[in-house]
């Protein structure tokens, strides 16, 4: 999960519920979660770290696992 402070929202990618690994991307702003339908995205995973790079206006996702 990473924060976009200038736009006042956070982005969440992936996760695991014990056996299912998720690859969806969500935003959270003003108390509302929104599922993003992305055409390009990482493979499903959990435990990754993310950071927003304001100089290049991109999110960098790194690390994590693709196995339960």
Image (cartoon, helix red, strand yellow):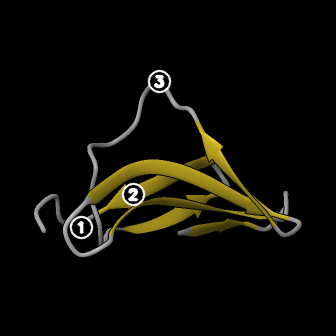
Rendered-image quadrant of the C terminus: bottom left
Q: How many marks on residues? A: 3
Residue that mark 2 sits on = 61
Whether pointer 1 and pointer 2 mark residues with C-beta atoms closer than 8 Å, the reply is: yes
Instruction: Report how far apart the C-alphas of labels 2 and 3 lie in the structure.
Output: 16 Å
Identify the residue at image location x=24%, y=67%.
64
Identify the residue at image location x=53%, y=69%.
1
Q: Name the foreground residue: 57 vs 27.
A: 27
Q: Badge 1: few (under 14), some or many (20 or more) residues near its Cα, within 10 Å?
A: some
Q: Earlier in the sequence, mark 2 or mark 3?
A: 3
Residue that mark 1 sits on = 64
Residue placed farthest to the top in the image? 39
Q: Which label was assigned to residue 24? A: none
> Where is residue 59 drawn, in percent x and y?
53, 52
Q: Is residue 64 left or right of residue 55?
A: left
Residue that mark 3 sits on = 39
Q: Is mark 2 on a helix, strand or loop?
A: strand
Mark nearer the viewer, 1 or 2: 1
Residue 3, compared with residue 36, is above or below; it is below
Q: Which of marks 3 and 1 is nearer the N terminus?
A: 3
> Where is residue 3 drawn, in percent x and y?
67, 68
Instruction: Report how far apart the C-alphas of labels 3 and 1 lie in the structure.
Output: 21 Å
């Amino acid at each position: 999960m990473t924060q976009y402070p200038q736009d006042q929202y956070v982005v969440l990618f992936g996760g695991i519920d014990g056996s299912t690994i998720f690859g969806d991307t969500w935003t959270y702003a003003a108390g509302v979660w929104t599922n993003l339908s992305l055409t390009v995205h990482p493979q499903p995973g959990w435990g990754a770290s993310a950071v927003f790079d304001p100089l290049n206006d991109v999110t960098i996702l790194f690390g994590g696992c693709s196995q339960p």
